[in-house]
Image: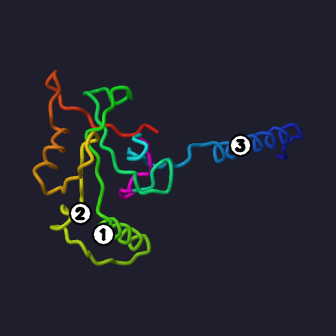
Amino acid sequence: MPLQPSEKKQLTFAGVLFALAILFFVLFGPSERVALEYFYDESEQKLFTAPTGLIPPIKGINDDQLDGVRAIVIAPKGQCGDESAHRIAYLEKWSPQLKQQMEAAARAKAAGHAVPNFVGRSQRKFHQFVRRPDSTQWHNMNTDEAAKIMATLRTKDAQGKIPDICTTSR
């Protein structure tokens, strides 16, 4: 049984609407979001976000200087959503030698190649540094001072609760 002209119009109209709906979702649908993490610009003394996986130090927010270091941000239990409750527990960065090796390894992995480790795992603690935000002194990860700084993450507050580590919500 052949379609009536009014049925053809309805099917054509439905097809056009379906195509427009698909086009709408392709153009305005959710794009892939880039995961972000907190960094701290040492010269500006401000937090900013950058894509996860960058190896600090990175370019900061105000110039081409490599003064952006990773910031470990904490807040009282259950208050990460309140930016006014955020505080920087500590900052971290890598030595230029380890940064270069890690970036080369990432590029090689993306290209399907292997890269030898110039800095062995046992030596990496000598090339990773932490400091408190109110200090200028960086400490190797293998020192007692670094352990004390990182213990901030396990230090209970006045209510006896361990703080939450905050991630970006963008």
Label 2 amino acid? Answer: His
Residue under the image location 44 percent in, 74 percent down? 111
In the rendered image, residue 80, in percent from the top left (x then y), is placed at 33, 30
Query: Is residue 37 among what the camera can see?
Result: no
Rounded to the nearest angstrom, the CA distance separating label 3 from label 1 is 55 Å
Choose the circle earlier in sequence order: 2 or 1.
Answer: 1
Residue under the image location 20 percent in, 71 percent down? 120
> Magenta residues?
47-57
Choose the circle earlier in sequence order: 3 or 1.
Answer: 3
**Vertical comparison of 91 with 117: above or below:** above
Which dot marks residue 127? 2
In the rendered image, residue 138, in percent from the top left (x then y), is placed at 23, 52
Rounded to the nearest angstrom, the CA distance separating label 3 from label 2 is 57 Å
Report the front residue among 102 and 30: 102
Q: Nearer the viewer, mark 3 or mark 1?
A: 1
Quadrant position of residue 126: bottom left
Label 3 amino acid? Answer: Phe
Label 1 amino acid? Answer: Gln
Along the horizontal axis of the image, is 35 left or right of 137? right
Quadrant position of residue 95: bottom left
Which dot marks residue 97? 1
Q: Secondary structure beneath disc 2?
A: loop
Q: Secondary structure beneath disc 3?
A: helix
Do the residues under discs 2 and 1 have CB atoms within 8 angstroms?
Answer: yes
Membership of 51 in magenta stretch: yes
Q: Which residue is mark 3?
A: 18
Query: Is residue 23 among what the camera can see?
Result: yes
* Disc 1 residue crowd, few under 14, some 14–19, many 20+, Cα 10 Å: few
